[in-house]
Image (cartoon, coloured by chain):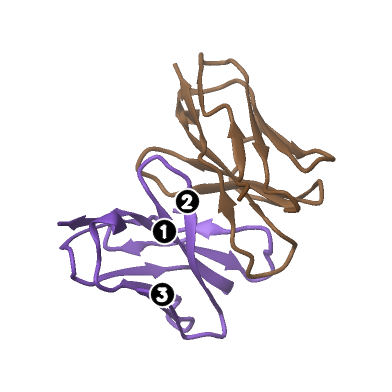
Amino acid sequence: SQQGEEDPQALSIQEGENATMNCSYKTSINNLQWYRQNSGRGLVHLILIRSNEREKHSGRLRVTLDTSKKSSSLLITASRAADTASYFCATEPSGGYNKLIFGAGTRLAVHP
Amino acid sequence: AAGVIQSPRHLIKEKRETATLKCYPIPRHDTVYWYQQGPGQDPQFLISFYEKMQSDKGSIPDRFSAQQFSDYHSELNMSSLELGDSALYFCASSLGRLAGEELFFGEGSRLTVL
């Protein structure tokens, strides 16, 4: 990966359970974004957290950012089968306004 | 709402051939990005353009070139194709050269090199 690692690489849960995905990155950043990708499709933006923010919520999504540890987590609460997808974190490096670097991604499978 | 349009969606080429991928950003978006995604891999940043000028460069091979035209569409030209170039190529666009802009992705062009 150009950026860092995601943990876990794959996650399998039942509907209604919560899913937590972690992301680590290497450089200082302006912001960190999470994207979702259904198999073979384009990436869809989920949420953005700026480097001066520690936590952000959007619907069933909760993102945290720890710049001292260069890490972030994405929590999906009350998961649904339709949440099955790959989830990527992406960082905008400090000073790099037109460059978004993706991590390795977590494949989430939510079983009915 | 209008989305990012990529063409062709699928492309099959032989080794050493040339391929051109096209990207039409969302109207009024002035920044275009190109990414390459191999099977089971994360998207790798290739290059970006802002207002028709190259803005940032990633791991784009010297065999590849790209440009953004006056109507803001962009083309990625790939020459001397290799088997390892087989991948999904994504274009994304965003509005403005500001930190914190989300990217809007197209559905990708799948290139297969035989």
Q: In the image, which is nearer the foreground, mark 3 or mark 2?
A: 2
Taking depth in this image into account, of B9 and B40 the one nearest to the observer is B9
User: Disc 2 marks which residue?
Assistant: A43
x and y, in percent, of residue A15 in the image: 18, 64
Chain to which mark 3 belongs: A
Q: Secondary structure at mark 1?
A: strand
The residue lying at 60 percent from left, 35 percent from top is B6
Identify whether A100 is placed above or below B5.
below
Q: Quick one: which chain is brown?
A: B
The residue lying at 57 percent from left, 85 percent from top is A52
The residue lying at 35 percent from left, 43 percent from top is A39
Mark 2 crowd level (few <14, some 14–19, many ≥20, 10 Å Cα):
many
Whether labels 1 and 3 share one chain: yes
User: Disc 1 marks which residue?
Assistant: A88
Residue placed furthest toward the front: B1
For badge 2, the amino acid type reads Leu
Quadrant (top left/top right/bottom left/bottom right) for the C terminus of chain A: bottom left
Q: In the image, which is nearer the foreground, mark 1 or mark 2?
A: 2
Q: Are marks 1 and 3 in contact (CB under 8 Å)?
A: no
Chain to which mark 2 belongs: A
Mark sitting on residue A72: 3
Taking depth in this image into account, of B24 and A1 the one nearest to the observer is B24
Mark sitting on residue A107: none
Q: Quick one: which chain is purple?
A: A
The answer to which quarter of the image holds residue A40 is: top left
- Label 1, label 3: how many angstroms apart (C-alpha)? 11 Å
